Image (cartoon, rainbow, N blue to C red):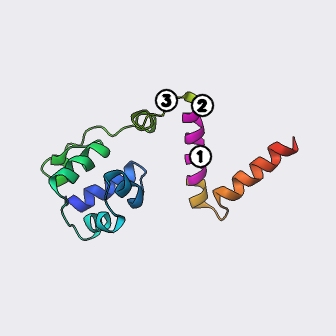
Amino acid sequence: MLFNVRLKQLRELAGLSQAELARRLGIGRDLYNKYERAGIQPSYDTLVLIAKTLNTSIDYLLGNSNVNPDPLTTEEFLAQQGVTNPEHIAMLLSMMDLVKKDSESDSSVGEYLEKDMNMKQAN
């Protein structure tokens, strides 16, 4: 499997946009997009950072191995990012569910949150 295909799969599995992963890597979104779309190979240092950020190995990214290390669970990822407060984790998981539902419906997360806030203020 080609590098760009694995890169996209791992990014999506991590729930990251191209822009967010580019930000974490310290590169521009346009350059990152070339990694996924045009198959441009990153520098070694960037490749190491990609593997670390996506919790995989360089060998897996480059197609030298078909064994991918176990991906992080959402909770493990949040802990890795320094989010350990159970209330914050629960809030973030709820927000992720809202975003998923938003992508499947006609309303937006903002509209939902506004309605939710209005209901809480009314009580």
Q: Residue drawn 27% across and 43% down?
A: 52
SS under mark 1: helix
Q: Magenta-highlighted stretch: main secondary structure?
A: helix
Q: Residue drawn 36% across and 64% down?
A: 29
Left/right of residue 7 with respect to residue 89 in the rendered view:
left
- Depth check: give the residue in front, 26 or 2: 26
Label 1: how many Cα within 10 Å (few below 14, some 14–19, many 20+): some
Please determine whether, in this image, residue 38 is positioned above or below residue 90. Answer: below
| Pointer 1 residue | 95
Left/right of residue 68 with respect to residue 88 in the rendered view:
left
Left/right of residue 32 with respect to residue 65 in the rendered view:
right
Mark 1 or 3, closer to the camera: 3
- Please give the range of residues in magenta: 88-99
Q: Judge whether residue 98 is colored magenta.
A: yes
- Of the 4 image quadrants, the one containing the C terminus is top right
In the image, residue 120 lies at what x, y percent? 81, 43
